[in-house]
Image (tube, rainbow, N blue to C red):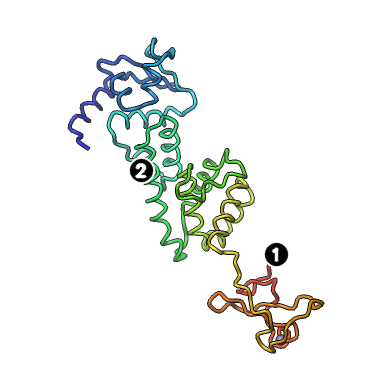
Amino acid sequence: MDNRFLTEDEKLLDTGWFSDVTVKCGDRIWRLHKNILCTRSVWFEKALTGRFEESKTGHVDIQNFDPEAIGWLIRYIYTGICDIPALRPGSKTNFVTCYEVHTVADYFAMTSLAKIALDTLAADFDARLGPVQMQYEPVDWLDELFETVKLIYQDVPLTDTSALSSSSSSPIRHALVTFVHTARFYLLQNEAFTHFLDEAPPVFALDMFRAMRTTGDFLAHLPEPQCFLCRNKPTRSEKAYYTHLAPEKMKLHAACATCANKRDLLPCTSDWSGKGLP
Ligand SMILES: [Zn+2]
């Protein structure tokens, strides 16, 4: 983008020179410029040129956002720049800030800012995936991940499956589910994460299940319908005929109860590492 004039625009923002509009949010007031706001934001154009009260008074009162987030939005409108890591220097990760920027951008129909938030979040997730998949302990961002999950899922109904599609209507939720799903082998063995699943919004756990289902996580390749040792086929009356043996290329081998007992095979209520299922 040609940004030769952006520093001048930022000067207008910082000084309030030639201001003809005021925007108030919480305890903050900005003295702004109708021409800049209306040419760069459809939301402000509608508010300031339509039949709304604001277009007569030149005063916009925003109540449903934090002043901090409105400040980010306004600075972006004036400069076209939003450096998310710099918004809250010192915070370890960006998850929550990305979500908040995305929310304010989405509400005020600033598509390019929403994209910056989403891209930053995706890059942040990407940077964290490798170390997690390699099980390099410890990760220091779980608490912020949990906070982000709670924020993103606060109003999602159980029947909403839109997070699973890559053309999702909630792209930020899609990015989150994709990340958690990719990192699941680490996360599901992490005590804090499994504890969090008990208190998280139920639809988050459901989304994980849905994602795991689509990638075949629960698809046991069915074993041969006969004992792999004695080749006997079970009759309908035999109970618990199959027991399982460690997977070979993800294929289950089944053994009859007699062979399983002889060979000391694990019962089918144990996982592959020998841990009993609860
Ligand atoms: Zn057998």
The amino acid pointed to by label 2 is Pro
Location of residue 187 with respect to 238 vertically, above or below: above
* Image mark for residue 85: 2
Q: Quadrant of the N terminus?
A: top left
Q: Quadrant of the C terminus?
A: bottom right
Question: Within the displayed image, which quadrant is ligand 1 positioned in?
Answer: bottom right
Q: Position of residue 39 (x, y in %)?
A: 30, 24
Numbered disc 1: secondary structure = loop
Numbered disc 2: secondary structure = helix
The amino acid pointed to by label 1 is Pro
Residue wearing tag 1: 278
Quadrant of residue 217 within the rendered picture: bottom right
Location of residue 269 with respect to 186 vertically, above or below: below
Drawn side of residue 212 relative to residue 140, left or right: right
Outermost residue to the top:
56
Quadrant of residue 218 within the rendered picture: bottom right
Outermost residue to the left:
4
Drawn side of residue 81 relative to residue 110, left or right: left
- Residue placed at 68% from the left, 67% from the top? 277
Q: Position of residue 50 (x, y in %)?
A: 40, 16
- Residue placed at 29% from the left, 34% from the top? 80
Mark 1 CB within 8 Å of ligand 1? no
Q: Earlier in the sequence, mark 1 or mark 2?
A: 2
- Residue placed at 39% from the left, 21% from the top? 46
Q: Position of residue 137 (x, y in %)?
A: 47, 62
Location of residue 196 with respect to 48 vertically, above or below: below
In depth, the one of 159 and 276 nearer the eye is: 159
Outermost residue to the right:
237
Q: Position of residue 4 (x, y in %)?
A: 17, 32
